Image (cartoon, rainbow, N blue to C red):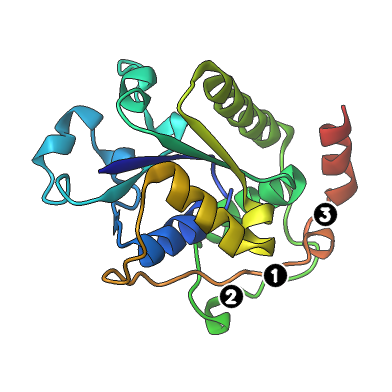
Amino acid sequence: MRIGLVATSRSGSTYFRRYLCNTFGLYDSESWLKKNSYQNIGETNWVHQPHILKIFPHYIPVDENIQDILKDYKNIWLYRRDVLSQFFSHVTRLRTKINHVHSKKEIPDIPDESLIATKEEFDRFNSKLNEFWDLFYANHKNYLVAFENFLNDPLSTLVDIQEKFGLEINNNIKTQLTVKLDIDYEKKFINFKEIKEWFAE
């Protein structure tokens, strides 16, 4: 059994994916598609286990049709309502080179007014969001989850997913959950107000 998790960078996909793996006993294929072609998935040692396949649309090479990847199984589409914070998180990751932390001790010490985002970075980020929504509306096997809703009420989301995907509670797999960074982006970004204006355009 395969469940696709379609998302964009810094949407909460790692925490969400691992939470589902721990709850339903699903193998975590992590970012397999980032370095591998979907055509080779049959060669993996986990393909016959129930698993989650993370799908970032920008991972898929232009010579591969993403619709061919999405069509054979049901997908969860994960997004963040707070796209402003998502963008700040995205740029912070680019600057610090830190993707995720698993304890408070690992949270990077970022000096105030030390970060700046460019309009080019915003445009690329926005383009990936638009690509996500274009794909979502073009597909029919869809289950849409707002990351904030999941954080506020995990049980309701899990029950919904369990019913829609025919899953059973299974604690055989344990992955390490990530820790929220809790960064005050207004203090860290020099051009915080300018970035907010980009989103308002």
Between 56 and 72, the one lying in front of the other is 72
Give the residue type that dot 2 points to.
Ile
Residue depicted at 37% across the width and 47% down the height: 166
Task: Identify the residue under disc 3.
Answer: 190
Q: Secondary structure at mark 3?
A: loop
Give the residue type that dot 3 points to.
Ile
Marked residue nearer the N-terminal end (2 or 3): 2
Q: Is residue 108 left or right of residue 36?
A: right
In the picture, the disc for residue 125 is none
Q: Nearer the viewer, mark 2 or mark 3?
A: 2
* Residue 176 coordinates in the image, percent (x, y): 40, 72
Residue depicted at 29% across the width and 45% down the height: 32
Q: Nearer the viewer, mark 3 or mark 1?
A: 1
* Residue 99 visible (yes or no): no
* Residue 116 coordinates in the image, percent (x, y): 74, 50
Between 167 and 70, the one lying in front of the other is 167
Cα separation between marks 2 and 3: 20 Å
Determine crowd level at label 2: few under 14, some 14-19, many 20+ residues with C-alpha closer than 10 A. Answer: some
Cα separation between marks 3 and 1: 18 Å
The C terminus: image quadrant: top right
* Residue 14 visible (yes or no): yes
Marked residue nearer the N-terminal end (3 or 1): 1
Q: Residue 63, located in which quarter of the rendered image?
A: top left
Task: Identify the residue under disc 1.
Answer: 182
Above or below residue 195? Residue 22 is below
Task: Identify the residue under disc 2.
Answer: 107
Give the residue type that dot 1 points to.
Asp
Determine crowd level at label 3: few under 14, some 14-19, many 20+ residues with C-alpha closer than 10 A. Answer: some
Marked residue nearer the N-terminal end (1 or 2): 2
